[in-house]
Amino acid sequence: MEYSKRDANILSDAWKESNEYMSCPKCGKDMIISQIDPINSSDENYISFDTIIECSSCSFKLRSESFKVLGGVKDFDLKKISIGSWSDSGSRASLDYEHVLDYNMLKQLKESGELVEFLIVNNHVVEIIE
């Protein structure tokens, strides 16, 4: 499954519009994310899902790949985040992604050391699942 940089930018922009919900880039209404089928990959320590992201109101729809990672904020800046997590063998791992998350929320998570689940779509961290 191939994704264009344009698709990643559309997804990124959709999440940036609102702090709570992903907003449709066409009409501004709430988006729905549905993880459909698992995608098996022996290279990763998580399960990826074929994912459909669609507007609850208009016809806007994107097909994507998503997964969740449990970990803590190791480091971040305005564009990138480093997540401290674990490999499937149990050793520590550092995972680096672009993100669309609130800077102050990341600062608070880093200071607390709290473990959270990160939703990653097209290699962009787009949401914290608590």
Image (cartoon, rainbow, N blue to C red):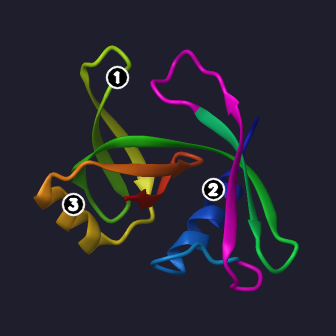
Identify which amino acid the numbered label 3 is placed on: Leu
Estimate the x, y position of residue 91 in percent, counting from the top left.
25, 19
Estimate the x, y position of residue 10 in percent, counting from the top left.
66, 66
Indicate which disc, 2 or 1, sits on the residue closer to the N terminus: 2
Determine which residue is flagged by label 1: 87
Residue neighbourhood size for the residue with mark 1, other residues' Cα within 10 Å, grouped as few (<14), some (14–19), many (≥20): few
Estimate the x, y position of residue 82 in percent, counting from the top left.
29, 45
Determine which residue is flagged by label 3: 109
Identify which amino acid the numbered label 1 is placed on: Ser
Question: Where is the N terminus found, in terms of image quarters?
Answer: top right
Query: Which type of secondary structure does the marked residue at label 1 adopt?
Result: loop
Q: Which range is magenta? A: 25-47
> Is residue 64 found inside the magenta-colored segment of the image?
no
Identify which amino acid the numbered label 2 is placed on: Ala
Residue neighbourhood size for the residue with mark 3, other residues' Cα within 10 Å, grouped as few (<14), some (14–19), many (≥20): some
Prevalent SS, magenta region? loop
**Front position among marks 2 and 1:** 1
Give how far apart the Cα atoms at labels 3 and 1 are: 21 Å
The structure residue drawn at horizontal position 81% and vertical position 80%, both measured from the top left corner, is 57
Q: Is residue 90 above or below residue 128?
A: above
Left or right placement of residue 49 versus residue 55 in this view: left
